[in-house]
Image (cartoon, rainbow, N blue to C red):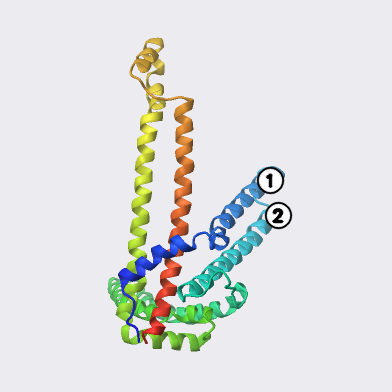
Amino acid sequence: MKPLISISDLMSFGFTAIKETWKPTLKYSIWFFILPLAYYLLLTVAGLAGAVGSRGMGPGPAFWLVYFVGMAVMVLGLIWAAIGLFQYMLAYTHGQNMKTWKPKRAALSYLPGLLWIAVLSALPAIGSMIIVALPMLLARRTAAGILLSLVLFLIAIPFLAWIGTLFSQAQILLLNDEARGLEAIRKSIDLVQKRWGAVFARIFVPVILFVLIVMVIQMVLVFVGIILFVSLLGGWAAFAGVASQGREGLEALRGAGVGFGLVSILILLAYGVFAFVVAIATRIAQLLFQTSVSAKLFHSLKESK
């Protein structure tokens, strides 16, 4: 029996998975960007067309049809992409030959089972929130009732973390074609219950650390963008400030070597495109990291039971 995989090994595996799977999984991950973008562009066009057609009377039936039908299509598409990506990662982390691998079932065929597990998993959280709210409601929002609700809420946080960790493998068991419904939850509890603290750490620590890495990358991009803007186009602000001084002010501005013009704009546009591509790449990397780490932890739990 193998020991449960360590957090460092999980993270190392996640980074390896990004490098090895980003290209074959683009058929899934790219939809996380295309579908929302297409939906909001469609809404914008429908809204503009409706505004012109109704002459300022508000959105018409056509807009709401596009709104709800488009949202349904987008949500189903995102679910299909998420399930397909997880199916791929479950096979990849299990060491299958990905050149010949094919999913056992269509991705959306899992949707009813996943929704049912989600409902069952949400029941403890719903029950906890009802209990938390009762003192405040029964005491008619008095100070004592609010204080008791706050205490119950603080107690509910570790309880929900415990329950969520116990149930964390249920949907993965369904996707791995091993169990469904209550049986999937029972098997998830069986996998986790005697080591839920270790599983909790392996679920959240890698994700939190990776999110911090992404945040650092984003902050660097913003910082570099600000520097470029100030150095290349800061002259526009200065221009606006001295334009009222006439010809003498403009000559002083040129003499100061303020950088603005077509070249500066092109450089900033190029940087904007670069930052946008990096943002998409980091989001895809985050998707691959999280799914690969979850799938690897699932297989490790089974092998170390």
Identify the amino acid type marked 2: Ala
Identify the amino acid type marked 1: Ala
Q: Secondary structure at mark 1?
A: helix
Q: Residue furthest top?
A: 248
Q: Of residues 1 and 222, which is closer to you in this image?
A: 1
Q: Of residues 130 and 269, which is closer to you in this image?
A: 269
**Residue 294: percent from the left, percent from the top?**
42, 72
Circle 1 is placed at which residue position?
49
Other residues around mark 1 within 10 Å, as few (<14) / some (14–19) / many (≥20): some
Is residue 153 shown above or below 179? Answer: above
Q: CA distance from mark 1 to mark 2?
A: 9 Å
Along the polypeptide, which appears first: circle 1 or circle 2? 1
**Residue 136: percent from the left, percent from the top?**
35, 74
Quarter location, residue 18: bottom left
Quarter location, residue 106: bottom right
Is residue 222 shown above or below 288? Answer: above
Q: Of residues 232 and 16, which is closer to you in this image?
A: 16
Label tally: 2
**Residue 146: percent from the left, percent from the top?**
31, 72
- The residue under the point 55% across, 57% down is 30
Circle 2 is placed at which residue position?
62
Other residues around mark 2 within 10 Å, as few (<14) / some (14–19) / many (≥20): few
Q: What is the quadrant of the C terminus in the image? A: bottom left
